[in-house]
Image (cartoon, rainbow, N blue to C red):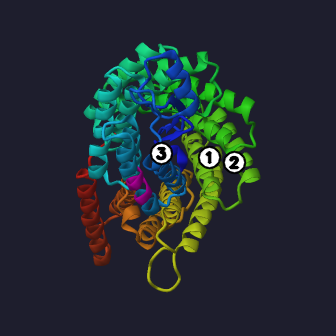
């Protein structure tokens, strides 16, 4: 797992390092109980060790082992060696209890580390009581309004958010936000971090207006703090743009996406995939608005940049070709009433792009599938499944689009009195269906809602195509094929209808 997905709270040289879901790095003070005198405070800050009431420093064999186990566990954790890290974090927890005392804040940090490990392993039932115990200890030791309690509540909120336990996440974030506002102030980036995550929770709960306000305010704080070009700020802008797109507020989405692209062009230039992806998002929004000329210009520039950065058979090149083809198909639809010949030319351009996209996706999938007759992908790694999922999605979309393109072209040719091949569209759609069966061999891929939805779309298009060409003397085999398609459509629709619908 990438480090950016972790939320690890570890003590190093007197500071707690907190890595959040948004990849931000926050340095907080050691959660040691603050000494009463100024002299004690200075000594504690220098040593990073916890003082007890008589002024002596808690330093013994157990505290030494706690630090060694914690550091070693952290290194293994960040390397993805979770089994070894779990043993060390468990040992660190026991040493912290014996060295610092059962209810010491260092014990809370050890609970939190072990909880994070279980979260990454999706052992949520084991993680939750550890998170809760960490918060409880900090509240008892430091008080309900201490900033370190706020940080722990933020972590707990993230834990709930990952599981879509939205009400629990909301309560944690709201309390953390209140603490951070009082201690850090409303202009602090850590305050903005919790505000952003609370906005995400509220959006998922359907409170879109409140969510939008929180996310906008979190972005404003980042920009006013000189972090306009930071990865975190840009990620929040992208999320805001997604909200606008999903609510069909395309003009507002366009403004945000232009802002993102301008920042990326200045900071990274067009030799960065981050800039290309930002431009592509803007291009797709422009396509949805009907601004086809600028959309195609941007998407073609994206394709040119990708070909300079990536191998020519990379899946991103295939997806880029698919997007350009869709713009050309839309442009053809505009032209068909005015100039049939130009409309056909646009379709032929789109067909070339789709053919390229199909070849790349097929090549990727065939490399991933084992050639020993077992109908399995090479290995079972998440990376292999991710690559196969992306390639199959592009392949199905491209073949489906090709089938519809051929239907449209056939209609245009017939309108001019020309003979059109009647099988091209059907062949493309049947190839789409056969590709789903050939390459959707891993259930995590074939059961993906996005993949199933594209497969269903192809089934319906083929059924409609055959039905429209049906006649009284339709061959028995064709009638049987229509029934098979109808049964398969019903099956897939049933599976999709049973899936819960979540916002992203």
Where does label 1 land, which residue? 324
- In this view, the residue in front, 19 or 87, is 87
Give the mark nearest the N terminus, 3 or 2: 3
Q: Nearer the viewer, mark 1 or mark 3?
A: 3
Where does label 2 land, which residue? 303
Q: Quadrant of residue 286?
A: top right
**Quick check: 117 above or below 477?**
above
Q: Residue at x 64, y 20 (%)?
A: 226
Q: Are marks 2 and 1 in contact (CB under 8 Å)?
A: yes
**Quick check: 304 above or below 191?**
below
Where does label 3 land, which residue? 6
Q: Position of residue 26 (x, y in %)?
A: 53, 32
Q: Position of residue 280 (x, y in %)?
A: 61, 40
Whether residue 479 sits left or right of residue 356 in the image: it is left
Tell me the SS state at disc 3: loop
Give the mark nearest the N terminus, 2 or 1: 2
| Pointer 3 local density, CA inside 10 Å: few below 14, some 14–19, many at least 20 | many
């Amino acid at each position: 797992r990438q480090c950016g997905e972790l939320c690890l709270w570890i003590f190093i040289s007197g500071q707690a390092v907190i890595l959040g879901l948004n990849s931000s790095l926050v340095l907080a003070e050691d959660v040691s109980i603050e000494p009463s005198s100024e002299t004690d405070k200075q000594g504690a800050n220098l040593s990073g060790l916890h003082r007890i009431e008589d002024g002596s420093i808690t330093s013994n064999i157990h505290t030494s082992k706690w630090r060694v186990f914690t550091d070693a566990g952290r290194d293994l954790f960040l390397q993805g060696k979770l089994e070894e890290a779990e043993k060390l974090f468990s040992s660190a927890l026991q040493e912290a209890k014996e060295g610092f005392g059962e209810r010491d804040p260092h014990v809370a940090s050890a609970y939190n580390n072990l909880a994070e490990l279980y979260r990454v392993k999706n052992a949520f039932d084991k993680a939750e009581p550890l998170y809760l115990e960490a918060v409880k200890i900090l509240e008892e030791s430091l008080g309900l309004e201490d900033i370190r309690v706020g940080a722990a509540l933020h972590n707990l909120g993230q834990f709930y958010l990952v599981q879509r336990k939205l009400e629990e996440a909301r309560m944690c974030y709201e309390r953390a936000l209140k603490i951070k506002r009082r201690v850090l102030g409303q202009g602090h980036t850590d305050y903005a971090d919790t505000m952003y995550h609370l906005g995400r929770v509220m959006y998922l709960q359907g409170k879109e207006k409140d969510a939008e306000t929180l996310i906008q305010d979190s972005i404003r704080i980042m920009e006013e703090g000189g972090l306009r070009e930071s990865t975190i700020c840009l990620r929040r802008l992208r999320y805001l743009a997604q909200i606008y797109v999903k609510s069909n507020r395309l003009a507002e989405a366009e403004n945000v996406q232009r802002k993102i692209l301008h920042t990326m062009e200045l900071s990274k230039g067009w030799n960065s995939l981050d800039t290309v992806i930002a431009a592509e998002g803007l291009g797709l929004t422009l396509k949805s608005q009907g601004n086809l000329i600028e959309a195609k210009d941007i998407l073609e520039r994206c394709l040119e940049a990708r070909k300079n950065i990536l191998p020519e058979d990379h899946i991103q090149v295939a997806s880029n070709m698919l997007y350009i083809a869709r713009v050309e198909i839309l442009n053809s639809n505009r032209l068909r009433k005015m100039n049939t010949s130009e409309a056909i030319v646009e379709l032929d351009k789109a067909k070339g792009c789709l053919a390229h996209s199909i070849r790349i996706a097929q090549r990727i999938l065939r490399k991933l599938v084992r050639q020993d007759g077992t109908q399995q992908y090479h290995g079972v790694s998440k990376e292999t499944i991710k690559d196969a999922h992306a390639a199959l999605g592009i392949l199905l979309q491209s073949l489906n689009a090709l089938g519809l393109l051929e239907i449209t072209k056939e209609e245009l040719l017939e309108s001019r009195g020309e003979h059109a091949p009647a099988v091209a569209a059907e062949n493309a759609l049947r190839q789409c269906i056969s590709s789903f069966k050939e390459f959707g061999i891993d259930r995590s891929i074939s059961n993906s809602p996005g993949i199933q939805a594209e497969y269903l779309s192809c089934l319906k298009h083929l059924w409609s195509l055959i039905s429209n060409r049906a006649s009284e003397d339709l061959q028995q085999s064709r009638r049987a094929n229509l029934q098979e398609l109808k049964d398969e459509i019903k099956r897939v629709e049933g599976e999709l209808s049973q899936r819960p619908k979540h916002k992203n």
